[in-house]
Structures are given as C-alpha cells and as structure tokens.
Amino acid sequence: MAWRLAAVGLLGCGRIGIDPVVHDATGKADAPVVDATADAPGSIAGVYTLDQMIDYTCAAGLVTIGVTTFTFAVGGTSLTVTSNDAGAPQQPCTMPGTVTYPMFDVTCTLAGSCNETYELSGMMTGAKSWSGTFTATYTGTCLNCTMQSDPRTGTKP
C-alpha cells in the first residue's frame, strides 16, 4: 500500500491528511480510502425538523408525546438530544448517548410505576440530515401504553 499526502477541503477549511492509496499489480491507483470521520462530529449539532411528527398519547393522557424537532448537542463523542415537546415531564426526556460518526444512539428513561424508555438511533445521511428510528418502550403498570417504533428522518437548514 502506498500513501500520499492530500489536502482535503472540509466546509471551506483546508485539512491536511494522509490518504491511503492502493495500487494494483500494474501500478494503477485505486480510489483512495474514504475517511468517514472527515466530517467532524460537531457539525451534526443543530435543530432537526422531523419528516413526520411523533404523536402518541396513552395512559389517559399521562403520557403525551408531540415532537416535531430534535436538537442535537455534541461534545466529543457524546451526544445529547432534546425534543420540542412541551409536556411536563418532557416526553421524551433528554436523551444522552454517543456518536461514532456517522452512527448515533441516545436513550433515556423516565422512572415510575410505568418506566418510559425512549431511544433514537440512526445515522447521518448528509451534512444536514439523518435517518433513524425513534422507539418508546413502556414497562410496569402502564395502562394502555404499548411499544412504539417509528422510522424518522430529520433535516436542518
């Protein structure tokens, strides 16, 4: 394997890096190996509008979810996701987790006689978009609350 020094543009900034280039038996260079971490995880921070509202009510209205946006806050490999749900308590709760670009996974639990666990997992599909699954799980005395698992996409301006 041969190595070459390359300058790679990243959001208008130059970045110097070493990109591996594989050569076949004839000496012809294959395409360079793509570094999936080239897009800094911090760039995923922001407010994402969902393609479809998350709208679910159960337990005679004690659990009410109405989410149209998620806010991603990043610190290193830590990711915290909050929703624009105005309920008290906010449902889903603030979901901490990790990001290993381009994948992310966050989860939280509201403990009580009915434990409400919320998870958002997925992957970045572009500089301003993600695709994933929002899952709500209820355990304990939860009346008529049942697991919900819905695919969603989010985009930011």
Image (cartoon, grey):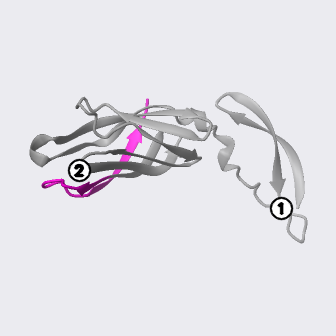
Give the left or right position of residue 132, taking residue 91 as reference.
right
Q: Quadrant of the C terminus?
A: top left
Give the left or right position of residue 111, taking residue 38 as reference.
left
Q: Position of residue 67 (x, y in %)?
A: 27, 37
Disc assigned to residue 128: none
The answer to the question of whether label 2 and label 1 lie on touching residues, with beta carbons closer than 8 A, is no
Q: Nearer the viewer, mark 2 or mark 1?
A: 2
The magenta span reads 136-157
Q: Which residue is mark 2?
A: 114
Dot placed on the residue nearer the N-terminal end, 2 or 1: 1
Q: Amino acid at mark 2?
A: Cys
Give the left or right position of residue 80, taking residue 23 as reference.
left
Using the image as rendered, state which of residue 143 and residue 28 is in the foreground: 143
| Residue drawn where x is 57% and y is 48% of the image | 102
Disc assigned to residue 22: 1
Identify the residue at the far front of this view.
Answer: 113
The Cα atoms of the two marked residues, 2 and 1, are separated by: 55 Å
Q: Amino acid at mark 1?
A: Val
| Residue drawn where x is 39% and y is 36% of the image | 94
Q: Quadrant of residue 151?
A: bottom left
Q: Quadrant of the N terminus?
A: bottom right
Queried whether the magenta region covers residue 14, the answer comes back as no
Queried whether the magenta region covers residue 153, the answer comes back as yes
Instruction: Classify mark 2: residues with Cα within 10 Å, few (<14), some (14-19) or many (20+).
Output: some
